Amino acid sequence: MGWLQSLFSPLKKIWLKLNSTQKKRRGLYILYEDVKSCPYEDVHVLWSILVESHSPSLPLKK
């Protein structure tokens, strides 16, 4: 039975990682809709700062 657990353990980790990523994206999308409908300019500026700080950085070429 231990071999069965060792087989499914990596799959479970991958599933949990993908599932949590989708929830984060969905949450940001809902927030994006709220920001888009907001009339205040400073909210849009704060949103752009937030998006730029969480964008994945490009790998450095050597």
Image (cartoon, rainbow, N blue to C red):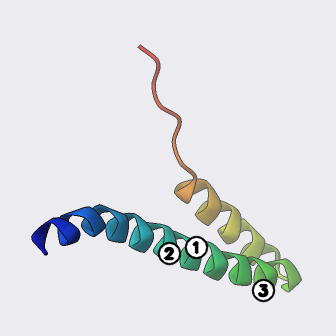
- Mark 2 lies on a secondary structure that is helix
Crowding at mark 3 (Cα within 10 Å: few <14, some 14-19, many 20+): few
Task: Look at label 1 and name its amino acid.
Answer: Gln
Residue wearing tag 3: 34
Task: Look at label 3 and name its amino acid.
Answer: Asp
**CA separation, marks 2 and 1?**
5 Å
Q: Earlier in the sequence, mark 1 or mark 3?
A: 1
Marks 2 and 1 in Cβ contact (< 8 Å): yes
Residue wearing tag 1: 22
- Mark 3 lies on a secondary structure that is helix
11 or 45, nearer to the observer: 11
Q: Residue at x 34, y 71 (%)?
A: 12
Marks 1 and 3 in Cβ contact (< 8 Å): no
Q: Residue at x 61, y 54 (%)?
A: 52
Q: Residue at x 29, y 68 (%)?
A: 8
Quadrant of the rendered structure where residue 29 is?
A: bottom right
Q: Closer to the observer: label 2 or label 3?
A: 2
From this viewpoint, which residue is outermost toward the left? 2
Drawn side of residue 32 relative to residue 49, left or right: right
- Mark 1 lies on a secondary structure that is helix
Q: Residue at x 75, y 76 (%)?
A: 32
On the image, the x and y values in percent for residue 47 come to 68, 69
**CA separation, marks 1 and 3?**
19 Å
Above or below — where is 37 with respect to 48? below
Task: Look at label 2 and name its amino acid.
Answer: Asn
